Amino acid sequence: MKLYAIIMAGGSGTRFWPASRKKNPKQLLPLGPSERALLVDTAERLLPIIARERIYVATSELLSDRIAELLPDLPREQILAEPVGRNTAPCIGWAASILHERDPDAVLAVMPSDHIVQDLPALHRAIELAELAAKGGSLVTMGIRPTRPETGFGYLEMGEELAPGVHRALRFIEKPDLDRAVEFYRSSHYLWNAGMFFFQARTILDAIDEFLPELGEGLRDIGKARGTPDELKVLRERFATLPEISIDHGVMERASNVAVIPVSCGWSDLGSWQAAWELADKDENDNVLPEGAIAIDSSGCYAIGKKDKVLAIVGMKDMVIVDTDDALLILPRNRSQDVRAIVEELKARGDSRF
């Protein structure tokens, strides 16, 4: 069997506004410790264990050209452009149907495009375990061992060991309140849900038929048109009718053959400006600033400025400042999650600057 990667890169990254926009979202920006786009880092970390010809990117029609620019060595047919976003179950199902047609024995590694992993050997070992478990017919997910009580992540409850390093996944748990997050952190049975999945293409397609028959029927309709003159027309018309549901809710939470691989790999979902500050190199005052910036009596700040402007801050503590051509964001670092509210307000106003 061959392991194929499906990198999901269709999100909008609203929590990183105003740097992240609908046409240039988070995964296409250099927001991590390296100077490369997050998507490029994701593809590069997979290359030691998955050949380039088996790495696919699932994205939107809006972003496909930009992704082709960022990944020039990736053949264009390996960029799967959805005509409309319908959440992760249709995304994964459509990609699985394409790869199953190309290789009936395909095993899929489904990865987010916008996460950070700092311990690559640990990730690669976990992927090898996940591939073996998927080969045995399991729907496999990867769980991150918590490093703190966290209310911003979903969790997995881990059951008995099925094979070395592979456990039964007992249940998926929505984002908890702080008391439950503390309880989960103190226990050895709970993991963060990292949104990474591994399964044979045929296994996930069978599961979709069982739990999401409407989606399965739609994928077959799209598949029948593949390679015909009507392929794009059918894809655009039929994809928009697929049920909008995540793979977690639609399949993983309902199936009985779900396994989980616990891993500690220096993982971060890079979910906010706060997380970006935590991961970045800082100066002696814990500031993350652009080259040439001036900081007087300021500490713990994260700032992004324009190359042709001097960014200067005075008397600021634990703030986020992001200056772009058409927007300026200033907020306390500990309120980074509230950036989403700004984007929602822009949408409500009919303002396209999101």
Image (cartoon, rainbow, N blue to C red):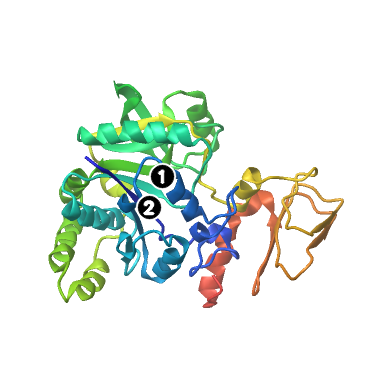
Residue 286 placement (x, y as % from top left):
75, 44
Quadrant the C terminus occupies: bottom right
Residue at 49% across / 47% down in the picture?
Answer: 115
Q: Residues within 10 Å of mark 1 (few under 14, many from 20)?
A: many
Residue 129 placement (x, y as % from top left):
33, 31
Residue at 20% across / 55% down in the picture?
Answer: 97
- Judge whether residue 138 can be spotted in this image: no
Secondary structure under the numbered disc 1 in the rendered image: helix
- Judge whether residue 299 can be spotted in this image: yes
The answer to whether 48 appears left or right of 15 in the picture is left
Asked whether 173 or 121 is in front, the reply is 121
Residue 138 placement (x, y as % from top left):
23, 35
Secondary structure under the numbered disc 2 in the rendered image: strand
Residue farthest to the front? 73
Residue at 22% across / 45% down in the picture?
Answer: 106
Residue that carries the numbered disc 1 in the rendered image:
46
Asked whether 47 or 66 is in front, the reply is 47
Tell me, for residue 3, which label it has, or none: none
